[in-house]
Image: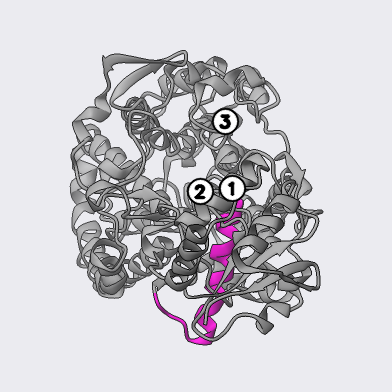
Amino acid sequence: MHTGLPVRVSVLRVTSAPRTAGEAEVPDTAETTGQSASPPTASSQRRRFPVDVAVCAGLVVAAAILVNGLLTNPTTGALALNANDQALMEWMLAVATRFFTGDLDLVSHLLNAPDGVNLMGNTSVLVIGLLLTPVTLAFGASVSFAVATFLNLAGTAVAWYLLFARTVRLHWAAAAIGGAFCAFAPGTMSQANSHLHMTAQWLLPPIVWCVIRLANSPDLEAPGWSRRVAALGALLGLLITVQLFVGEEPLFLTAVTLALISLAYAVLAPRKVRSALVPVVGGLFVAAGLSMILLAYPLWVQFAGPQHLPNGPFSASFFGADLVGYVSYSPLSIGGSREAERLVSGPAEYNTFFGLPLLLVVTGAAIWQWRRPVVVASAVTSVILGTLALGPQLIIDGEHTQHWGPYSLLANVPIVDSALPTRFALPLIPVMALVLAMAIDRALRDPRPALRFVVPAVIAVALLPVVPKPLPTVDRDPVPRFFTEGHWRGCVRPGSTLVPVPLPSPSQPDHMRWAAGADAAFAIPEGFFIAPYAEGGRASVGIYSQPTSQLLNEVAETGAIPVITDENRARAAEDVAYWKASCMVLANGEQPQEAALRTTLEGLFGPGRQVADVTVWRVGS
């Protein structure tokens, strides 16, 4: 989905529930944000620091193990389940380095030349690319992609752990389980297959932290109240702005989730919400104003600029979650099998595969904590998000039925209508993590030994089947030395393009890696992106191929050498002029149909010239 409106989040104020008979006579900090128990002292913070460091280190190591196959072989390895999106992401990471050379255009003409692509309308992961620019320039975009995949999982785990441990003030073990589940749940690991914008969730806990701090602001008459609210609002606005350039869809889903939890909480505890309403509204007003100022131009580019998208390119009916998926296990989990593949639209969308035992345990944990408004609000939100994820028509055991789905109510709502319904299940992960972590925290603080053992043990057993496997990888051809060693400079004239053979397409985008290997220093035609090329200017994936591109693609697929006519040569000259091409490049020893492609190119343009590990045809005037 490609959304970009600044987020207005509602109030989330977490309070302690009254103890029932038999509960521990200790402060119930599992639901507090600092108001029901005394604030932690400096000495207690220092005592907990080594524990936090150890837990965070363990989460980072776990992320490294899961991404080990990619980290140890980044240049000639690829994620086996989604190598196409990886090629796109590597190009996006390479393009981000151009910002440091003064190329600040949010509509890049380095892909789909000469028309270009709207980076705001595509998943440009600009902030990730900027942060990793030193890595990209030193080692290449493929290494940056591997590092980003690892850091996203590690950063997400650490950020959620710190929110649970330091802000919600849960027991460190409970917070560790919650943080690990947020980062390594089936849906997150599924998105880790090349969707960098979806797994980059390390700013979402700070956004939630800002909302909680606003809700717990002191009384209006307290000294410095307005400055505190303004500062938190400004920080929230900055975080929203940065997150929009990291990943818009997680930002949108977080806003929806916070709004639903806050509305449900307001119904359950209206008096507590009223006391927090003024600081939250004030902080959100500051955040919205600041983010609107900072994002005015980028949002104009996204929704009204060149190559902007009037709609989402994907069918909501096709991308609904299968109802059976909720009680199944992902093939990416140790309890799963490949039989579940028929239940999803692709290997990066196992968003709902929690398994029946875990769903039952989460339900039981919510019922056990029914006195806590935040738990009940989380349960209500989970039901709403879970049903929205089913899409406009229910899909049951791989069969698309005609049964109505609640998502139909949102089918024509701007912004929401471009979402993939199945991804409404992704916010269930942190919501479920909160419920589970609070249950563990409550059990560990209970004086009854049996309860302290049974509750964590039951949750651990339910979580065991969803423990993730390492992301699978496959070998791929390295980027030719012609690009990595700079030989391309000898054939690309200023303002012209280089044409890979065959040209990159949505189904075969690998040759976009050639440009990424040269830090996107030259333009290429066609490629894998989203742009308004469908009927009526609606969104499409990729562009229609020019005649010469179609001819070369057919040769690459079939190996059949066509008879080259004068008409073919005339069309090739027209396409070269349209692309503003200065050279055509064919890698040596890479294409299965290399000989057929070489013969076809010689028929169109005459003999080529060997340069490094490619053959170059100089074309154009």
Q: Is residue 219 above or below residue 596?
A: below
- The residue type indicated by label 1 comes to Asn
- The residue type indicated by label 3 comes to Ile
Which comes before the other along the chain, label 3 or label 1? Answer: 1
One can see residue 269 in this view: yes
- Residues marked 2 and 1 touching at CB (< 8 Å): yes
Q: Give the residue drawn at x 31%, y 46%.
A: 312
Give whichever of 541, 370 is nearer the camera: 541
Can you tell which quarter of the image residue 192 is in?
Answer: top right
Mark-to-mark CA distance, 3 and 1: 40 Å
Location of mark 2 (residue): 506
Position in image of residue 40 (x %, y %): 52, 56
As helix, strand or loop, the secondary structure at mark 2 comes to loop
Q: Is residue 572 above or below residue 350?
A: below
Q: Which residues are magenta?
A: 84-105
Mark-to-mark CA distance, 2 and 1: 8 Å
Is 545 on the left-hand or right-hand side of 139?
A: left
Q: Give the residue drawn at x 45%, y 37%.
A: 426
**Most common SS among magenta residues:** helix
Which comes before the other along the chain, label 2 or label 3? Answer: 3
Location of mark 1 (residue): 84
Check residue 48 in the rendering and tell me which mark sits there, or answer none. Answer: none
